Structures are given as C-alpha cells and as structure tokens.
Amino acid sequence: MSDGTERHRTSPRNVPGLLLSLQQDRFSGAVVVSGSIGGTIHLHHGAIRAIETPGAPTVEALLLRSRRIGEVEWDAACTAAGPGGRLDATLVEQGHIGAAELEVLCVSALYDAAFAMALSTPDSWQVDRETPGPRLGHHEGTDPRRLTEETSRRVRQLAKSLGSVREFGQERIRPSARATAGIGRLSARYRDILLSADGRRTPRDIAFALGRGVYAVMLDISRMKALQLIQPEPPQAPATAPRVAPRDPGAEPPRAVAATGGGLPRRTPADRRPESAG
C-alpha cells in the first residue's frame, strides 16, 4: 500500500513466523496485533525493541507504580524531552534513574508484554512502516526467535502448576484464611500480593496495581496457591429477574375493595374519575 501499511488476516502463518520473516527483511516499523489482548510490536532492522499491550504494564507504569520515579519528575522529563526527543536519555541526565537500571526495565517490560499477548489468540495483524518508534525501549533489540522461545518457556513453567495459564490469568483471587492469620510471617512480595487480592482483581490487575510484571506476579501467585495462601473468588450467581405473569389484554383491571374494619378505604388509579373543568 502507498501509505506503508499492510493488513494480514489470520492464517496458518502465526505472529512469531511473521516476525522471523520481518527480521530477514531487516524491517523497521511496527506490527499491530488485534485480539482480546492485542498490542503493538516495534521493530528496528528486524530486532524487537518494545511491545505495548494493555495486557501488561509499560515501562512508564513500572516506573511510576513502583515509585521509582514520581509523577512530577516524570512529567518534567517528558516536557524536557519534547514529543520526539530521547526520553530515556533525559531521565538519566536528570538523575531520576541509572542507564543500566532503565535498560533492564525496558527488556523486562518487553518480555513480559510478549508473555501477556501469548495468553490470547490474535484475530489479525497489520504491518506498518510509518508507526512512530517507542519512547522507551530496548536499545539493541531482541531476536524474535529468542523472544518466542522464552515466552513459550514461561507458559510451560506456569502450566506445570496451574493447568490453563490463560484461564488462571482471568481468575479473581483472594487470600485464604490461612494466609490472613499468618500474613506477618510472609515475605514482602507475598504480603503485597495478598493486600492487593481483594476478590475483584485478577493476577494481571494485581501486576498493574503493584507495578510488577505479569509473569512475575503470576509465578508468585502459583507458588502461593500451592502453599494454600491464595484461593479463587467463588463466582457470583447471576441475579434472577422476578417472574411476571403475562398480561391478558382482554382481562378487566381489578377494582379496589373497601377495607373492612377500622382502616380507611383506598382508591386505585382505576377508581379515579376526571374532575369537571371549570
């Protein structure tokens, strides 16, 4: 297409296969994947620099939710860098974070986003050469084959103890009575998860709340589940609508009957007569 955009429908060829093909072409741009989770995969000369998906915290979310950087400092760095400037260099120059730590977070967020996207089946994807690159990403980029292998390893690791990782990721959890009684003896990581597990949050929700990776949180929760510290929230029974008898259009509306005894008689709207005008 003339605008640099190509659309691809689902086919036997999957997204990992597409990424390998783009690596051979030394493609620079993005692959936008649609689906129940979906996301945008950024590539530079065939290497994957970043993945943005609603299924996993971004580098920004990891920095702010974990309180490594305050919102005021973050806003100041974004303003100083400008719309197209080097935000990573600005954060380092202003002393908010070290270059090595920021690079580790970028790589961690990249692999975590790939794991989150692997928990759903893509509907379609779009290859776009004109998509702007990420403001924060892995400088050297990651080999697509290596990323796919690591993602598969993580899914297999969790499946050993959880069964369906996809279903577990959608499960709302809460602390068990055993965990509540002994919460003071648990590690800080486990305590943070227990305090966030309110029966309404899924493991993914907890990861966002804590500013941690989805995979790391799910791995901790799987271990806590084995220790009987976590249990699923029982599904709520659907509310039943009151039964209403079908109305017979030919039936006469019931007339009010005066109450016997000391009560006053009542009227229904059917008893009312129009008052005379005048």
Image (cartoon, rainbow, N blue to C red):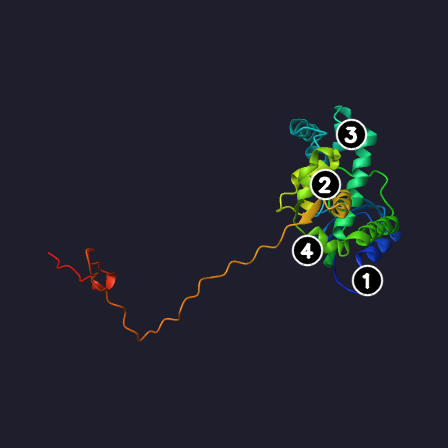
Q: Do the residues bearing badges 4 and 1 touch, measured as CB atoms within 8 Å?
A: no
| Residue at the extreme left | 278
Location of mark 2 (residue): 58
Work out how far the residue at label 4 is from the one at label 1, CA to CA, in angstroms.
19 Å
- Residue 43, above or below 139: below
Work out how far the residue at label 3 is from the one at label 1, CA to CA, in angstroms.
38 Å
Along the viewing direction, whichever of 146 and 274 lies nearer the viewer = 274
> Local crowd at mark 4 within 10 Å, few (<14), some, or many (≥20)?
some
- Give SS at disc 2: loop
What residue is at 67 percent from the left and 52 percent from the top? 171
Q: Using residue 211 as the reference point, say whether residue 147 is left or right of it.
A: right
Location of mark 3 (residue): 89
Work out how far the residue at label 4 is from the one at label 3, CA to CA, in angstroms.
34 Å
- Give SS at disc 4: loop
> Mark 1 is on which residue type?
Arg
What residue is at 88 percent from the left and 48 percent from the top? 146
Q: Do the residues bearing badges 3 and 1 touch, measured as CB atoms within 8 Å?
A: no
What residue is at 24 percent from the left and 61 percent from the top? 268
- Relative image position of residue 252 (x, y in whole percent): 27, 72
- Give SS at disc 1: loop
Compare marks 3 and 2 and give the one earlier in the sequence.
2
- Residue 75, above or below 22: above
Location of mark 1 (residue): 13
User: Which-is-in-front pick, marks 2 and 1?
Assistant: 2
Compare marks 4 and 1 and give the one earlier in the sequence.
1
Work out how far the residue at label 2 is from the one at label 4, CA to CA, in angstroms.
18 Å
Along the viewing direction, whichever of 161 and 229 lies nearer the viewer = 229
Checking the image for residue 36, the label placed there is 4
> Mark 4 is on which residue type?
Ser
Along the viewing direction, whichever of 198 and 48 lies nearer the viewer = 198
